[in-house]
Amino acid sequence: MKLLEGKTAIVTGAARGIGEAIACKLAEHGANVALTYVSESSAEKASALEQKLMATGVKAKAFRSNASIFAECESLVTEVIREFGTVDICVNNAGISKDNLLLRMTPEQWDEVIDTNLKSVYNMTKQVIRPMMKAKKGSIINMSSIIGIRGNAGQSSYAASKAGIIGFTKSMAHELGSRNIRSNAIAPGFIETDMTQYLNDGEASKAYLAKIPLGRFGSAEEIANTTLFLASDLSSYITGQVISACGGLNI
């Protein structure tokens, strides 16, 4: 059974890792997917993913768009509406980390993380709520992090951006609920992707695993499954929530 037949989803930061897994999962369940990437170096991979999704029988298109820039988000959503007709699901997944102790962190490093991780969620949500309000339905899914709940030394900018996403998500649930638009967040724990190469370090790996009740790191596929749930009507009475997909790390 396909849970998203005929729906259109935007997935930011979809050229790799969790974003790529999410795009594939939504397409597998019948959603047409507009996926974004930022750097020219990701263009080839994004194009390959576009072709992969289209091979499943859905419509897909890769857009080069920087979610931290308001005007680019505005242009993106306008193009998606022109190409796909509507937006039913928005997955705000674009994110980076620039880890450093606060004593050594530059203002530029702070701003880059806040803009990419948090401002991007404002930028994209601002654009998609108009077509969603017109349709009187929609699901907005914001990628936070367990670090936004627990904090972590050397990750103050990342933690602040991901905690901000949680507050924004809950506020949108209050604002948009009467229009049948749901707003939820996912807080992944330690997920094995190319952004988390440090998890492969022997001693560091053991230290992290010792804190996780399930005793293992998560996969991008598992985060994609959580996203599918929140994107579909299976979660039709869920809004303003944060699902911690972290193997029990935050209990």
Image: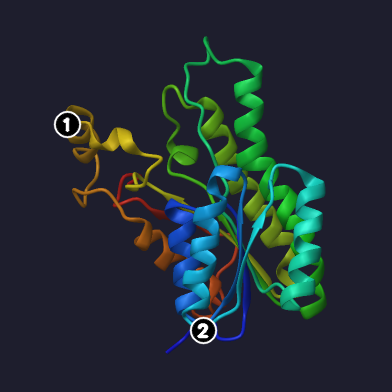
Horizontally, is 1 left or right of 131 in the view? left
Q: Is residue 243 visible?
A: no
Q: Is residue 196 visible?
A: yes
Q: Residue 129 in the image: state x and y as whole percent.
A: 77, 64
Question: In the displayed structure, would residue 171 be above or below residue 153?
Answer: below
| Nearest the eye: 97 or 174 | 97
Q: Which mark is residue 202?
A: 1
Q: Which mark is residue 57?
A: 2
For the point 47% across and 63% down, which residue is it? 22
For the point 47% across and 19% down, which residue is it? 100
Q: Which of the 4 quarters of the picture holds residue 199?
A: top left
Label 1 neighbour load within 10 Å: few <14, some 14-19, many 20+: few
- Three-letter code for the amino acid on which mark 1 is drawn: Gly
| Nearest the eye: 243 or 110 | 110
Question: In the displayed structure, would residue 41 be above or below residue 227?
Answer: above
Horizontally, is 208 left or right of 228 in the view? left
